[in-house]
Amino acid sequence: MFTLFYGLWKYIFSKTEFHVLILGIDKAGKTTLLEKLKALYSNLEGLPPDRIVPTVGLNIGRIEASKEKLVFWDLGGQVGLRTIWEKYYEEAHAVIYVIDAACPSRFEDSKSALEKILRHQDLLGAPLLIVANKQDLAGAVSAEELARYLDLKELDERLYMFEAVSAYDGTGIKDGVDWLVEVMERSKRTDKLRARANIAGPGSA
Ligand SMILES: Nc1nc2c(ncn2[C@@H]2O[C@H](COP(=O)(O)OP(=O)(O)OP(=O)(O)O)[C@@H](O)[C@H]2O)c(=O)[nH]1
Ligand SMILES: [Mg+2]
């Protein structure tokens, strides 16, 4: 009985903490983006780019944006580490997929890793922000060009957006986060995750 009332109380009064997975192949700029997010949205400085090393485990960052709490999970993108990604899918409200827009020779690898994500059942309905990163570099392609190149067939009715970003100078980051918050607030997946957390009762996340 207590569990039932607790669940109801929690459903009505508690705020959802949104889990956002940051994925993409190695060197795309995921961790640099995470550090820039922290710098832009909190009083924390964030690691400078020259102190960031390739990710092997998990980096976590928490921010507050548009009065919502966001938790970012940044995972390593090296080939041998990509099998770990799916362990986080079930709990994710949304995905940021980062691509190095200045490195066309790796677009194909990026595309196939993204297609695999889109096919995974555990991420059904998760909104997707595709980041064309490194816009500060002269050779970077635009978000539109990247979208054309990727030519994704699996997007269906998923909420998605391409955004031109520089994790170095912060270009595009706030627009991307604003969009993410808005779509996560109204996505069916958020309702589903919220209901599941409440059914699990006290002690659940
Ligand atoms: N010019 C430029 N370089 C960037 C940008 N973002 C990241 N980089 C550089 O790209 C390289 C890889 O950045 P990381 O943030 O470590 O990439 P990652 O995606 O986290 O890589 P893994 O952890 O190995 O998966 C580093 O040399 C960064 O300084 C950007 O917006 N502009
Ligand atoms: Mg990293």
Image (cartoon, rainbow, N blue to C red):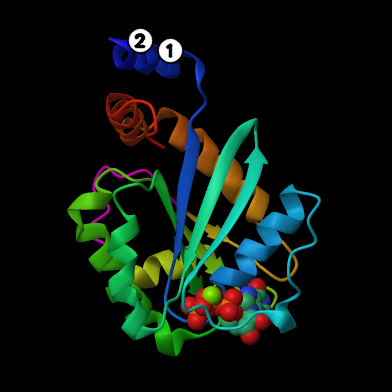
Q: Would you identify the image quadrant in which residue 159 lies?
A: top left
Region rendered in magenta: 151-161
| Amino acid type shown at disc 1 | Trp
| Amino acid type shown at disc 2 | Phe
Q: Would you identify the image quadrant in which residue 6 lies?
A: top left
Most common secondary structure along the magenta stretch: loop
Name the residue carrying label 2.
5
Give the structural element (helix, strand or loop) at label 1: helix
Residue 71 at x, y percent in the picture = 54, 48
Image side of residue 65 versus residue 95, left or right = right
Residue 96 at x, y percent in the picture = 47, 57
Residue 181 at x, y percent in the picture = 53, 38
Q: Residue placed farthest to the bottom in the image?
A: 105
Circle 2/circle 1 CB separation < 8 Å? yes
Residue 67 drawn in magenta: no
Asked if 94 appears above or below 96 in the picture, the reply is above
Image point 65% across, 33% down: which residue?
66
> In front: 32, or 193?
193
Q: What is the number of the mark on residue 9? A: 1
Q: Is mark 2 within 8 Å of ligand 2?
A: no
- Does residue 167 appear in this view? yes
Q: What is the number of the mark on residue 123? A: none
> In front: 73, or 25?
73
